[in-house]
Amino acid sequence: MNMMSEAAVEKALDGKMNEVSYKMVGREVSVYYGDKRALFDVNLNVRENTVTALIGPSGCGKSTFLRTLNRMNDTIDNCRVTGRITLDGDDIYDKEIDVVELRARVGMVFQKPNPFPKSIYENVAYGPKIHGLARNKADMDHIVEASLQRAGLWTEVKDRLHESGTGLSGGQQQRLCIARAIAVSPEVILMDEPCSALDPIATARVEELIHELRANYTIVIVTHSMQQAARVSQRTAMFHLGQLVEENDTDKMFTNPDDQRTQDYIMGRFG
Amino acid sequence: MTDAISSAAGLARPRPARRDIGIKRRYAAERRFRAYGIAALTFGIVFLFLLVSSVVSKGYTAFQQTMITVPVEFTEAIIDPKNERAENPQKLMTANYPLLARNAVAKVLGVAENDRTGLRDVNKMISDGVRSQLRDMVVANPALIGTTQTVSLLAAGDLDSAFKGQISLDVPEANRKVNDKQVGWMNQLAESGALAKHFNTGIFVNGNSSRPEAAGVGVALIGSFYMMLIVLVLSLPIGVAASIYLEEFAPKNRLTDLIEVNINNLAAVPSIVYGLLGLAVFINFAGLPRSASLVGGLVLTLMTLPTIIIATRAALKAVPPSIRAAALGLGASKMQTIFHHVLPLAMPGILTGTIIGLAHALGETAPLLLIGMVAFVANYPTTPLDPSTALPVQIYMWANEAERAFVERTSGAIIILLLFLIVMNVGAILLRRRFERRW
C-alpha cells in the first residue's frame, strides 16, 4: 500500500493519455437557485486519472458545477439542475440512480476541514461501515490503515487513532478528510478549495497528496490559486459569470490560452 | 506605514487635532453597564436567599414529629370483649384502639379513671392517627392482645406545635388550643423522656389526612412520579420526532411557517387553558377517570411539548452544516446523517430542554386543579388510573388548611418539591456532561 514512485505514476498514466477516456461528462449543464441562474449550459468532460482544476473569479459557478457532479446540490432546497451529467456513461440525474451509491463513487473533500467530532479511527471507518465494505474488525482495521497511509497521515496518527479527529492540526484534519473520502474507494474525488484554510506547508503536503492520488483516482479540484492549479492539474477549466470560458491542457492554459478572458484572469486583470 | 509617510512628508507638519470621540464616556458607559449587571445579580440572589431561607426556616420542623413513648396494654376487654375475632376478623378492624392509647398515657400521667375532663384532655394530646397505628400492629400480630408493648404514639397536631414552640403560651388559656394542664403534662412527659421529637417518616409515606400529624405527601409523590414518567415517555419521542421532521425534512413553505408560529405561541399559552383542554378532551370526550395521574400526565405532556420542540429545534440548528455535508458527501442517507451525526451532537441541548420542560411540568398546578387532581386522597394509587394528587397541588391544599401544624408541613412539602427539582437538574447536568465528553 505504499505510494507509487513518481516514475510508476507517469508510466501508468501514459498509456491512458493516448486514448482519452472520459470519466464524467457534463452536457449543457445549467443550475438555477430559485429564479437565479448560476450556470449556463456548461459542457465539460472530466478525464480519467487526471486532475482537473476549475478556476475563475468568486461567484463564477465553479463550486456549483463541482457540486452537481455528486448531486450535493440536492440538499439545497430551491436548487434545480438541467442538462445531462454522466458517470461512466450513466446519467447521474436519472431516477434509477441511487444518490447514496453515487456519492460513494464520487467522494468529496470540502473547503474547511470538517472531521466528525469522533475519534480518528471512527472518522475513517464511518464510510466503509455504512456501505458495508468491511466484513469484520480486521478488515476495517486494514481499510483504515490503508486509507490513512494513502492520505499520508498514518505515521502521524497511528499511535492515537482513538483520539478525537478534531484535535488534529488544520492540515492534518484536511488529510483526515481525504482519508475518509478515500476509505469508501471512490472513483472520483471532488475537492472544493481544499487548501484555502491551510498554511503553506500543509498546502504543500495536500498538493503532493493530490499528485499521488491521481494514479488511482480521477480528481476534480476547485481552486482560487493559479499557482496551485498550475502545480497540481493536467487539465484546467476556466469559469466566468456562470459560463465555461475555456477548457484546456494546464500547460497551454497558463502559457497560451485561447480565450482573452482567461489571459486576463491569469494575468490578474480581473477576479 | 504611517511612520514612513509622516517622515516622508516632513516632521514639521502638525498632527491634525483629534476629533473628540468620547472615549471617557465610552468607558463610563461600560462601567455603568457592569454595575447594572452586578446590581441585577445581587437583587436576584438576595431574593433567592430570602425565599429559600424563609421556606427552610418554616419548614424544617415538619421533618420532626412529636411522639409519646409509653407502655400500651392491649386489653382484650377493649379490643375484643366478646372474643369473636376467630370467626369475625372484621372485629379487629373496628375496635376502639384510641381508648388503649388514652388509657396508657393517662396511666403514666396518673390521671384517675373517673376524672372525665382529665381524660378528655389526655385524649386531645394523642393523635387520632394512633387508631390505624395500633390497629395495624394488632392485625399483623393478633397474639399481641393481652400483652403490654412499648409504643411510640403519635402526638396530636396541637401538642406537636406546642412542643415545637409554635404556639405562644402568652396567649390567654381560653384562646389557646392547648390548655395549661396539657402543657404541664407535656413538660412532665418531656422530662421523663417519654415525649420527644423523632424523625418524621410519615410526611414522606403517608397519604393526605385532615390531621396534620398524620398527613404526608406519599400519594402526591407517587402521583407526581407517574405524571413525570408519562410526560417523559410521551413528550420526548414525540417532541424530538416532530422537531427532526420540521427541521430536517419538512419543506419550507407557508404551512410549515404557520406550524412554527403556532408552536411558539403554544409555549406561551397559560397552563390553565391546557387544563380546560384536558378536561374537555380526555375526561369528557375520551371518558378517562377524573383525578387520575394518567390524565394529568397527558395534559402536562401537551404543555411540555412546545418547550421540548423549541429546544430541540434550536439544538438541531446549532449543529454545524459542515457535519451534515461531510456525512452526505460520504454517501450517508439523510436518516443516517441525522441519527449518526446530527442527533448525537444535538443531544445535550435536547436533554436540557427536556429537563427544563419536565421541571416546569413538575411544578405546574393550575391545569391539575381543573382535571380534579385537587382531591383528598388518602390511599396509594396503584396504577396511573387511580385517583391521586401531585406535589404542587398538595402544597396548595395544605396552604389552605387552618391548623397551625399545617403551616410547617406546607413549607416541608415545598422543600421536598425543591429537592426533587434540584435532583432533576443535577441529573440533567450530569447527563449533559456525559454526552459532551463523548464528543
Image: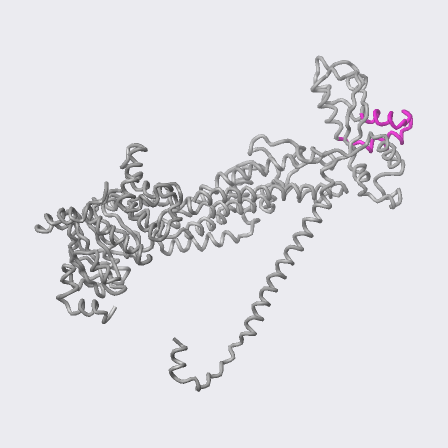
Horizontal side of residue B27 vs A104, given as left or right:
right
Horizontal side of residue A76 vs B118, given as left or right:
left
Position of residue A204 measured from the top left corner of the image (x, y, whole percent): 27, 55
Position of residue B83 measured from the top left corner of the image (x, y, whole percent): 77, 13
Residue B249 visible in the current orientation: no
Residue appearing at x 31%, y 54% in the figure: A202
Residue appearing at x 63%, y 61% in the figure: B39
Q: Is residue B63 above or below residue B85?
A: below
Residue B116 shown in magenta: yes
A183 or B237, which is in the foreground? Answer: A183
Magenta-drawn stretch, dominant element (helix, strand or loop): helix
What stretch of residues is rendered in magenta?
B101-128
Horizontal side of residue B72 vs B274, given as left or right:
right
Position of residue B335 measured from the top left corner of the image (x, y, whole percent): 34, 43
Image quarter in which the N terminus of chain B is found: bottom left
For residue B400, what is the image quadrant? top right
Residue A190 shown in magenta: no
Count the numbered circles shown.
Answer: 0
B347 or A117, which is in the foreground? Answer: A117
Q: Is residue A15 above or below residue A129?
A: below
Position of residue B70 measured from the top left corner of the image (x, y, whole percent): 81, 26
Image quarter in which the C terminus of chain B is found: top left
